[in-house]
Image (spheres, grey):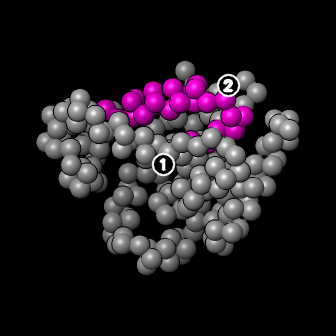
Amino acid sequence: MNFKTKNKVVIGLTGGMLSGKSTALAYFKECGAYVLSCDELVRQVSASASVKSKINHLLGGSDKEYLSQKIFDDSHARLHLEKIIHPLVFKEVAKRLKQDKTWCRVVEVPLLFEAHWADYFDLTISVYAPEKELLKRLKGRNIQKTDLLKRSIAQFPAEKKAAMADICLVNNAGTRELSEKISALYGALRKIYQVK
């Protein structure tokens, strides 16, 4: 099973923490693409009583703060949680993409390569920001460098994601440049897929 559909492009969008992947997703939406955020879908599926019950049983709690601490301190707990959540999110993505008729669909998947989802997409894009830029962004948010490093352990390094993706969008010169890159890419895809 995959997300691909004839004469349409389905893009898997990823990147490291603070790389700007959510901003990139918003720009794709502005261009006219149908967009989905797996982070948002995780929140939705995790809110169901049956899922909460499974998580409570396996991990001893389902509160967001408790789980954040638990999964970043315990890799086994993280894997248990992913085994519950990932199939549900996959099913929801497949359902929503099937219902949508837009020629270009973009799905933001933070763990795209880690979860082995890349082959389900026509194209993969990684948003990349150099470490120097990430440290600047930390100052503007309520995130400590130690938290960033701890959360990054659950993911491939940003450089690896960039190398694995079909396209790497370097995001180190502000949102305007990122917007222009996405607009140009969207235009190129429109020509390739012969969309008027």
Q: Name the residue at 46% across, 43% down.
A: 38
Magenta-highlighted residues: 84-107
Q: Is residue 156 left or right of residue 181?
A: left
Q: Which mark is residue 5?
A: 2
Query: Is 65 contained in the magenta span?
Result: no
Q: Name the residue at 72% across, 31% down.
A: 8
The percent coordinates of residue 84 (x first, y second) are: 31, 32
**Between disc 1 and disc 2, whose residue precedes?**
2
Nearest to viewer (mark 1 / mark 2): 2
Q: Is residue 82 left or right of residue 128?
A: left
Q: In terms of secondary structure, what is the magenta stretch mainly?
A: helix
How many dots with numbers?
Answer: 2
Q: Name the residue at 54% across, 42% down.
A: 36
Tell me the quarter of the image containing the N terminus: top right
| 84 up-or-down from 173: above or below | above
Q: In the structure shown, which secondary structural element does the residue marked by tag 2 occupy?
A: loop
Q: Name the residue at 74% across, 62% down.
A: 180
Q: Is residue 68 left or right of residue 163?
A: left
Quadrant of the image occupied by residue 49: top left
The percent coordinates of residue 166 (x first, y second) are: 68, 45
The percent coordinates of residue 10 (x first, y second) are: 65, 35
Q: In the structure shown, which secondary structural element does the residue marked by tag 1 occupy?
A: loop
| 151 up-or-down from 41: above or below | below
Label 1, label 2: how many angstroms apart (C-alpha)?
22 Å
Question: Does the image show residue 34?
Answer: yes
Q: Which mark is residue 110?
A: 1
Is 36 in front, or is 12?
Answer: 36
Q: Are marks 1 and 2 in contact (CB under 8 Å)?
A: no
Q: Residues within 10 Å of mark 1 (few under 14, many from 20)?
A: many
